[in-house]
């Protein structure tokens, strides 16, 4: 094999692998990314039912209802709109009424959401950035959630 | 007083780092040989000063000096001593101090053990190290000072986030940082070589052990993090493709590629330009890892406390080092003499394939991790890219790589004989097919491809062993001859075998736990037995218990198998006092066959509790595999040929053993 042929073999192999990877990346990005919406977005944007999405907002006060089984229902609201979420499983430790939360799952109807994953953060005062943004948009943001830089007590305002 | 000494040492270390950088630049620019000796001394001094600074911080934690803002924010007098100590790096400021300390340790190691390096290369590399050190010390001093005082001093601290109060997490950051920062050596040497416009096989001989050290620690650090997430977060998973996990995984992938390409460069004087580029990429990814974790630009289950302003500082550091590195590469790389070209079937070519697949996989992870960021910046849409993306992209790229792994070590340099190698791997192939069939026969459910995954893991293990067997001529020569050959094998070839075997073990664990995991969420009432994954589980009730700095509700579950009591599992919900936090502690009954894993939920209206039960078959193999990989690296490192220094030196000194942090 001449030097040139060898080089061609390497270049072709490289191109094949890269093309294969590019195909995988593009098709996976089409199928498996999950969009984040606030309850108001869900109301205005007409999201197709059955698609996997994330919904974020505050857990409505007094809305958490536990059934006799493992089923839990609660509302997520961003001040503008509210969505009813039902979830089957164990809630994260920091899940609490009035706290920011992200639910991942499928919309059954524009008002009802079936979650299979609930994310609440490790840190008491941490607000998921998506939730903070959508709350700001709705004008119900009540202050800085992250306490990383400033020295202030952790038991500050719940938001 | 001690805190002020630490603070002073920290600032002095910054000045010394500047001197280290400046003297190296002066020596290079003026060709002043007298200035060559400054950088090594500065590197040692910088390390010494940072030890003082770090010890001062640890002292402040141990003594619970709440007049130090950092201690007040992250510690509490009632915390157990070990977590007081580990609390020193369980937060942003302290962990950045640890970062620069480890960086200085590597710099000092070059200064101390690099006596037989070409003086110019050594000085240039130390200059680059000094530059990185100065940048990060400036970051620590100006944005994240751990020694800032509070006046008046509070009486009590706020406590460390309870999920960080854990032995695995006490050693996870040091290991991970040793890995991240270790790659700075490869980077510094790459930049030094580019500045000189000259690179030789001796360069690779130098860079390889350092890369290996960094790789070993990163492997262990990632495994430790995964293990912690598994038992502490209580979600039953071991890897979440979370941005912060990816941040450590990308340098690992690039570093693994670098490790292999450096072999080609050392042995065959080829792939020089690529190796240098890979060294720059690997460290750039390590810096990006620091940035992703420390800036909080990405939503992450790990994001504890984050600050965008610091992120901009780190972003500027990345832009400087990665951008500068790539620019220098584009400018100077054409000066590096290319090595010879080799046959498409050869050891070199197999390592090229390894590099190709690893770096493509790394790029795919990179895209998935940063795509949400790019999309939000461009269109404002908020998305998350999760496990489905990474599984769909990463797994198909890894499979051909793993299939090819056993072939590599069998192939000869320059020109290999693929048919000959295939013949020698027939036994391994047969055994792997058998393993796949057995796996298919004994499992009733799970994805159809999973038994092939078991076959793949077996293929890696037996393939690695076959190579060893063929080197010692097992079954082809008398036993005495086998033994003689085994004893005369270089340790680095044992290292390769064992590391590849470790990959196989981890693959077995990953495949079986992913494919055949059982999970069940249910309400359990006291006294009612429940059948799950071959066990019978009975909930006994909940009792209250008091720990050092928490109170907990402990649920008691008794697991029996065939009427015999196996264990009693005690998952709990803990209420920590400082900071007031609830955590869930899973109860795990480990066994070789798999882990029985119980998480306690909340009390249910009907008098029972909600419980989540898992059975994770063979999950321990994932971490055992990682430890085996570490061991393989360590064996390879102990090879005398790899001991730092020119090949002519034969003094058996325990240099590398003493340098590991």
Image: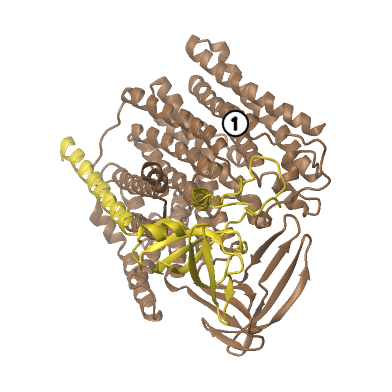
Location of residue A111 in the rendering, given as x and y in whole percent from the top left corner: 43, 68
Rendering quarter of residue B6: top right
Q: Give the percent coordinates (x, y) of residue B123.
A: 53, 21
- The kind of secondary structure element at disc 1 is helix
In the image, taking residue A77 as reference, residue B17 lies left or right, namely right
Q: Is residue B646 visible?
A: no
- Residue A142 screen position, x and y as percent: 60, 49
Residue at horizontal 41 percent and vertical 60 percent from the top:
A42
Q: How many marks?
A: 1
Which chain does tag 1 point to?
B
Q: Colour of chain A?
A: yellow
Instruction: In the picture, one chain is brown; tell me its letter.
Output: B
At 66% from the left edge and 86% from the top edge, which residue is drawn? B526
Q: Residue at x 36, y 51 (%)?
A: B409
**Quarter placement of the C terminus of chain B:** top right
* Foreground pick, B156 / B390: B156
In the picture, the quarter occupied by the N terminus of chain B is: top right
Q: Is residue B571 left or right of residue A80?
A: right
Is residue B574 visible in this depiction of the protein?
yes
Q: Position of residue A38 (x, y in %)?
A: 46, 57
Instruction: Relative to B506, say whether B640 is above or below.
Output: above
Q: Is residue B147 shown above or below B166?
A: above
Q: Which residue is identified by label 1? A: B139
Of B243 and B559, nearer the camera is: B243
- Please rate how many residues cluster around mark 1, counting C-alpha atoms within 10 Å: few if below 14, some from 14 to 19, many from 20: some
Q: How is the image coloured?
A: by chain
């Amino acid at each position: 094999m001449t030097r040139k042929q060898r080089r061609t073999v390497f270049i072709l192999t490289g191109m094949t692998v890269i093309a294969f990877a590019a195909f995988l990346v593009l098709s996976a990005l089409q199928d498996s990314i999950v969009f984040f919406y606030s309850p108001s977005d869900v109301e205005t944007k007409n999201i197709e039912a059955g698609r996997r999405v994330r919904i974020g907002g505050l857990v409505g006060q007094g809305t958490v209802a536990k059934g006799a089984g493992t089923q839990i229902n609660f509302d997520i609201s961003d001040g503008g709109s509210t969505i009813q979420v039902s979830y089957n499983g164990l809630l994260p430790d920091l899940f609490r009424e009035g706290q920011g939360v992200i639910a991942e799952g499928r919309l059954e109807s524009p008002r009802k959401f079936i979650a299979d994953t609930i994310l609440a953060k490790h840190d008491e005062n941490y607000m998921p950035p998506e939730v903070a943004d959508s709350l700001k948009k709705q004008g119900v943001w009540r202050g800085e959630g992250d306490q990383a830089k400033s020295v202030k007590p952790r038991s500050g305002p719940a938001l | 007083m001690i805190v002020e000494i630490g603070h002073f040492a920290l600032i002095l270390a910054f000045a010394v780092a500047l001197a280290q950088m400046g003297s190296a630049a002066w020596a290079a620019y003026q060709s002043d040989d007298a200035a060559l000796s400054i950088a090594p001394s500065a590197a040692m001094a910088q390390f010494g000063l940072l030890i003082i600074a770090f010890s001062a911080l640890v002292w402040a934690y141990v003594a619970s000096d709440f007049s130090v803002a950092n201690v007040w924010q992250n510690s509490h007098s009632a915390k157990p001593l070990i977590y007081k100590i580990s609390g020193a790096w369980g937060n942003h400021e302290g962990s950045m101090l640890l970062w620069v300390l480890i960086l200085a340790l590597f710099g000092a190691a070059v200064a101390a053990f690099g006596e037989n390096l070409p003086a110019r290369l050594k000085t240039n590399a130390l200059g680059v190290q000094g530059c990185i050190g100065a940048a990060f010390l400036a970051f620590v001093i100006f944005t994240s000072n751990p020694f800032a005082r509070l006046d008046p001093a509070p009486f009590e601290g706020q406590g460390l986030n309870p999920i960080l109060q854990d032995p695995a997490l006490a050693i996870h950051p040091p290991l991970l940082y040793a890995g991240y920062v270790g790659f700075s050596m490869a980077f510094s040497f790459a930049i030094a070589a580019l500045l000189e416009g000259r690179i030789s096989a001796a360069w690779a001989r130098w860079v390889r052990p350092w890369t290996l050290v960094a790789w070993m620690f990163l492997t262990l650090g990632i495994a430790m993090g995964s293990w912690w997430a598994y038992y502490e977060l209580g979600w039953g998973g071991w890897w979440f493709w979370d941005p912060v996990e990816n941040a450590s995984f990308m340098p690992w992938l690039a570093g693994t590629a670098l490790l292999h390409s450096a072999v080609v460069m050392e042995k065959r004087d080829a792939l020089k330009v690529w190796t240098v580029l890979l060294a720059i990429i690997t460290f750039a990814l390590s810096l990006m890892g620091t940035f992703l974790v420390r800036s909080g630009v990405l939503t992450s289950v790990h994001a504890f406390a984050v600050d965008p302003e610091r992120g901009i500082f780190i972003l500027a550091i990345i832009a400087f080092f990665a951008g500068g590195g790539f620019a220098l590469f584009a400018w100077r790389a054409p000066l590096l003499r290319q090595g010879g070209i080799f046959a498409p079937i050869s050891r070199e070519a197999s390592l090229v394939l390894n590099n190709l697949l690893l770096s493509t996989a790394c790029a795919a992870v990179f895209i998935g991790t940063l795509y949400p960021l790019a999309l939000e910046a461009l269109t404002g849409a908020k998305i998350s890219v999760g496990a489905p993306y990474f599984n769909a992209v990463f797994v198909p790229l890894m499979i051909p790589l793993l299939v090819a792994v056993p072939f590599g070590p069998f192939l000869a340099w320059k020109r290999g004989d693929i048919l000959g190698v295939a013949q020698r791997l027939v036994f391994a192939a047969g055994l792997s097919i058998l393993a796949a069939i057995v796996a298919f026969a004994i499992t009733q459910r799970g994805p159809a491809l999973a038994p092939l995954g078991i076959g793949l893991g077996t293929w890696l293990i037996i393939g690695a062993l076959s190579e060893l067997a063929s080197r010692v001529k097992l079954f082809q020569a008398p036993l005495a001859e086998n033994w003689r050959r085994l004893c005369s094998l270089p340790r680095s070839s044992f290292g390769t075998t064992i590391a590849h075997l470790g990959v196989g073990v981890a693959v077995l664990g990953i495949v079986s736990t992913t494919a055949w995991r059982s999970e069940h969420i249910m309400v359990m009432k006291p006294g009612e037995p429940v059948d799950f994954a071959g066990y019978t589980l009975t909930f006994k009730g909940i009792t209250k218990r008091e720990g050092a700095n928490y109170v907990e509700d402990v649920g008691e579950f008794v697991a029996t198998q065939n009427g015999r009591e196996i264990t009693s599992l005690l998952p709990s919900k803990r209420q920590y006092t400082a900071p007031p936090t609830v955590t869930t502690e899973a109860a795990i009954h480990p066994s070789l066959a798999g882990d029985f894993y119980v998480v306690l939920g909340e009390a249910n209206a009907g008098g029972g509790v909600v419980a989540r039960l898992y059975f994770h078959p063979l999950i321990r193999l994932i971490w055992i595999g990682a430890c085996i990989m570490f061991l393989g690296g360590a064996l390879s490192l102990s090879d005398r040929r790899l001991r730092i220094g020119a090949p002519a030196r034969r003094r058996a000194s325990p240099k590398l053993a003493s340098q590991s942090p």
